[in-house]
Amino acid sequence: MADDGYQLRRYDYRLDDEQSALRESFRAYFDKTVPPSRVRAAEPTGFDPALWDELRERAIVSMGLPESAGGDGAGLVELALVVEEAGRRAVPAPLPEVLTAARGLARLDPGGELLEQLRDDGAVATVAPGDADRRLVPAGAIATAVIGPRGDDLVLTVGAPARMQPNLASAPMAWWNVTGGTRIGAAADWLSIERDWHILAAAALVGLGQAAVDLGVQYAKDRVAFGVPIGALQAIAHPLVDAANAVEAARRLVWRAAWFCDNEPEGIGTQALCAIVGAGDAAEKAGATAIHTQGGFGVTLESDVQLYYRRAKGLAVLGGERRMLLRRIARQGMDSKAAAAQ
């Protein structure tokens, strides 16, 4: 019976009471402290230093670190819940990037100075996916350290924040050159860091998508045409339902991938890749649907929907080119089947 219960738990991703309380706590906090006006005020850099200080005071980075690295020992599931709530308010702070970098350093250099600065001083480090010497790095315009693969090594590049690359998403992305980085591990160590990055970026995308759906639904309830709320019309209601279903499916993918990372990392397979692909598709679909629901108003900068849509587009691109990610999923799936057949 114990084995049956364990197998059931592997396919049951409901939150326990503590996780639900954590989610509600951060939802209330972000709802109170990050209205759309604060998000707009942080443009065009997409970063609010005062908010980052507030998050540091809440020990948000140390929350996800193991106790051996001076943290609170929360798992990736808990971090994904927090990041999703941050995405739901388009929080102008580099949570997926810093949390990913900190968790990677906790595995590779738990007593290092940089990890201490991230945990206690509000320093910003980020990750650099890709294999080129010069890469477009998420949060690269506010980070002083970048972790990424280079050849057979995993390198840490330290320097001043790079000049922001202007972008429609108002995200603090910038180009970094990693040729002068210091080796901190092997390229294989990047896989666990990339996995965390994909899951946390996907969680943020789920939050962005959920916010867009909520705004679209509210508008469909409030806007009256031909004597009825436009949400009563199938041409409006059905696309919103499809968008909501896509976001919920992506949320389940994120929770599943995070649960496997925390409990059965050897069995995660392609789940983190599936999460970032699914969340990117869902968030973009939700944003586009909400914009269409609002009609002419939706395409204006006065509409809050465009805040979420633009950020979703930018984050989805930084998460990886989706055709390449899909090829990786297919290739890993075929390799797994071939290995099982031997």
Image (spheres, rainbow, N blue to C red):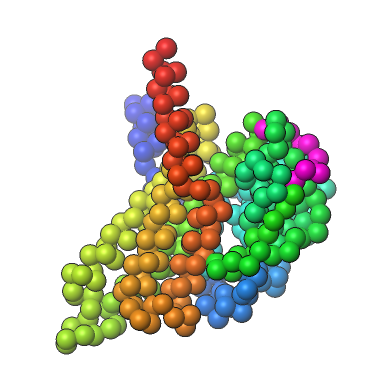
Q: Residue at x 52, y 38 (%)?
A: 261
Identity of the residue drawn at 55% across and 67% down: 169
Res. 271 image quadrant: top left
Residue 142 falls left or right of residue 13: right
Give, as a single range, the part of the protein colored magenta.
178-187
Q: Residue furthest top?
A: 342
Question: Is 316 colored magenta in this rendering?
Answer: no
Image quadrant containing the C terminus: top left
For the question of whether residue 58 can be seen, the reply is no
Q: Position of residue 310 (x, y in %)?
A: 49, 67
For the N terminus, the image quarter is: top left
Q: Residue at x 71, y 44 (%)?
A: 133
Would you say residue 179 is visible in this rendering?
Answer: yes
Query: In the image, is residue 2 above or below residue 136?
Result: above
**Residue found 46% across the figure and 47% down from its top:** 322
Indicate left or right for 12 with 175 as reference: left
Q: For this rendering, which residue is in front, 3 or 282?
A: 282
